[in-house]
Image: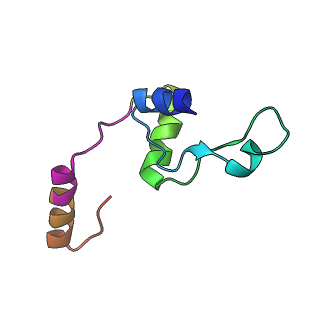
Amino acid sequence: MASLREALGGVGVVLPSLCVDPVTGAGKEPYALVQLGRCNVRTAERLVAALRGEPMEPVPTNEELMARVRRANREGRLPR
């Protein structure tokens, strides 16, 4: 799991709920299941781009995101 987290992070993808499934980890199977968990749509898009080997847009900073939201609010439309 740590290797997967590191590899995904290396291409700019963070799965916040990535973890080992505790139920399968306690069973008799030799390998526990890794839960990839839930993520937002933007993270899913970045994961698809990484898997396809496509370039990804840089992750915007919080300040950039807030500027987009303020601009969208002024223009009366939802941010993308």
Quadrant location, the C terminus: bottom left
> Residue lying farthest bottom?
76
Q: Is residue 63 visible?
A: yes
Q: Is residue 65 above or below residue 43?
A: below
Q: Going 21% across and 46% down the picture, which residue do you hit?
A: 61
In this view, the residue in front, 48 or 22, is 22
Instruction: Identify the image's colour scheme: rainbow, by chain, secondary structure or one colour.
Output: rainbow
Quarter-wise, where is residue 52 in the image?
Answer: top right
Q: Is residue 54 above or below residue 78?
A: above
Q: Is residue 8 above or below residue 60?
A: above
In this view, the residue in front, 5 or 59, is 5
In this view, the residue in front, 20 or 26, is 26
Q: Is residue 51 visible?
A: no
Q: Is residue 51 above or below residue 64?
A: above
Q: Position of residue 15 (x, y in %)?
A: 49, 45
Q: Position of residue 54 (x, y in %)?
A: 46, 28
**Residue 23 colored magenta?**
no
Q: Which residues are magenta?
A: 56-66
Quadrant location, the N terminus: top right
Quarter-wise, where is residue 57 in the image?
Answer: top left
What is the tally of numbered marks visible in this picture? 0
Q: Going 45% across and 47% down the picture, which residue do you hit?
A: 43
> Residue lying farthest right?
28
On the picture, is 76 further left or further right than 21?
left
Q: Position of residue 78 (x, y in %)?
A: 30, 68
**Residue 65 colored magenta?**
yes
Q: Position of residue 8 (x, y in %)?
A: 48, 32
In this view, the residue in front, 61 or 19, is 19
